[in-house]
């Protein structure tokens, strides 16, 4: 078997681990439950790895949401509930989940697209988030209208600014308020994010000077070569070049801190995964305990993590996670 055949059979990420004499990826603890409550969304973004949109119907049931809260109650070592989607706020159980988790003194994150504030029935959402002191991580791929609307849809930029002003008015992003407002940057195409610290400084200057908007941190996240973004890469014959870019930029120092080592991803149907990306590729946890109803933090803290070539997206350049750059 020649080298090229071996890479194909093992996958590009595992080949990089071998080349740098790194062991198989293992979990070290379960500190965060990242719960994807469904694929229903009021937007249809070009880069979306969930393939979410208004046409999707997948949505977490109350029974599954109750299992999530039970797991938090029984495992004090899990300190964070990270709620995502779709637009997670459109799930009927979103506010119940957030309220119950806060009552257990857990840190709760809402991964928000901002425009959901203007959907019917959601006008009081900013006040709800502030009342329960929920961290907002909001998508804003640029500080100019053209780039945002190109990736997320016409008019999204102006609505996003209006939403950010609402959050600022409640204290979000303001020093001393304790209400965290963090923004997320994704590249517009098949490229790696620029250095996070410099881009954060640019965002803060531009949003404050031009629009009077403030926030706490900017997270730069690499676009993963899966789902809708992968389809776009294939359509423009750029998939191979993008995979080569990720491979060339592999950073062995980023491997130690990839988010899957401290996290379990919960699907809308209760299926468990190593991360949200594996979830979208239908790669559940190895072993028999693959549902939230069978959750066992001890077993999951010692698991071998399932990997494939898309994992290069988390280890390229400065590394990438749901909390931004790793290095």
Image (spheres, rainbow, N blue to C red):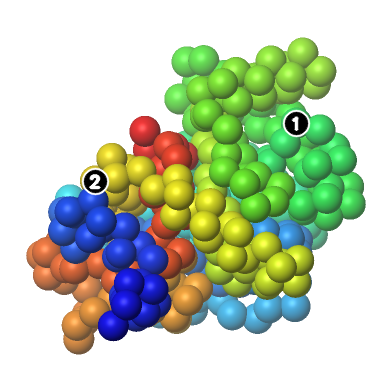
Secondary element type, mark 1: loop
Q: Tell which of 196 and 12 is nearer to you.
A: 12
Badge 1: few (under 14), some or many (20 or more) residues near its Cα, within 10 Å? some
In the drawing, does residue 153 fall left or right of residue 314? right
Q: Is residue 246 visible?
A: yes
**Left or right: where 266 falls relative to 208:** left
Res. 49 in view: no
Which tag is nearer the camera, tag 1 or tag 2? 2
Q: Residue at x 77, y 53 (%)?
A: 152
Residue shown at 62% from the left, 46% from the top: 191
Q: What x and y, as percent, mark residue 301? A: 15, 61
Residue at 57% over, 39% down: 193
Q: Secondary structure at mark 2?
A: helix
- 189 on left or right of 225: right
How far is mark 1 from mark 2, CA to CA? 32 Å
Position of residue 151 measured from the top left corner of the image (x, y, whole percent): 77, 52
Q: Neighbour class for label 2 at 10 Å: few (<14), some, many (≥20)?
A: some
Residue in the image at 71% along x and 68% along y: 237
Tag shown at residue 256? 2
Image disc number at residue 143: 1
In this rendering, the answer to whether 174 lies above or below 315 is above
Dividing the picture into quadrants, the one containing residue 296 is: bottom left
């Amino acid at each position: 078997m020649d080298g090229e055949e071996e890479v194909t059979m093992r996958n590009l990420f595992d080949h990089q681990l071998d080349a740098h004499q790194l062991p198989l990826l293992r979990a070290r603890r379960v500190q965060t439950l990242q719960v994807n409550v469904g694929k229903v969304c009021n937007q249809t973004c070009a880069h979306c790895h969930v393939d979410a949109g208004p046409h999707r119907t997948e949505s977490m049931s109350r029974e599954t949401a109750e299992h999530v809260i039970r797991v938090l109650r029984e495992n004090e070592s899990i300190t964070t509930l990270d709620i995502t989607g779709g637009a997670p706020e459109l799930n009927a159980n979103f506010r119940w989940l957030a309220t119950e988790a806060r009552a257990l003194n857990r840190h709760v994150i809402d991964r928000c697209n901002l425009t959901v504030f203007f959907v019917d029935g959601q006008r009081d959402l900013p006040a709800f988030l502030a009342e329960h002191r929920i961290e907002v991580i909001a998508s804003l791929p640029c500080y100019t209208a053209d780039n945002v609307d190109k990736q997320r849809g016409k008019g999204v930029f102006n609505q996003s600014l209006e939403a950010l002003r609402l959050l600022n008015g409640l204290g979000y992003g303001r020093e001393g308020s304790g209400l965290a407002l963090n923004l997320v940057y994704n590249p517009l195409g098949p490229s790696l994010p620029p250095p996070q610290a410099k881009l954060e400084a640019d965002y803060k200057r531009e949003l404050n000077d031009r629009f009077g908007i403030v926030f706490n941190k900017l997270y730069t996240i690499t676009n993963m070569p899966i789902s809708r973004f992968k389809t776009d890469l294939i359509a423009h014959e750029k998939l191979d070049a993008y995979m080569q870019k990720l491979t060339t930029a592999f950073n062995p120092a980023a491997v130690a801190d990839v988010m899957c080592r401290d996290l379990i991803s919960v699907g809308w149907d209760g299926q468990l995964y190593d991360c949200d990306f594996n979830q979208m590729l239908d790669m559940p946890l190895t072993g028999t305990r693959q549902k939230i109803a069978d959750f066992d933090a001890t077993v999951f803290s010692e698991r071998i993590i399932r990997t494939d070539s898309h994992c290069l997206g988390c280890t390229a350049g400065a590394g990438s996670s749901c909390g931004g750059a790793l290095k």
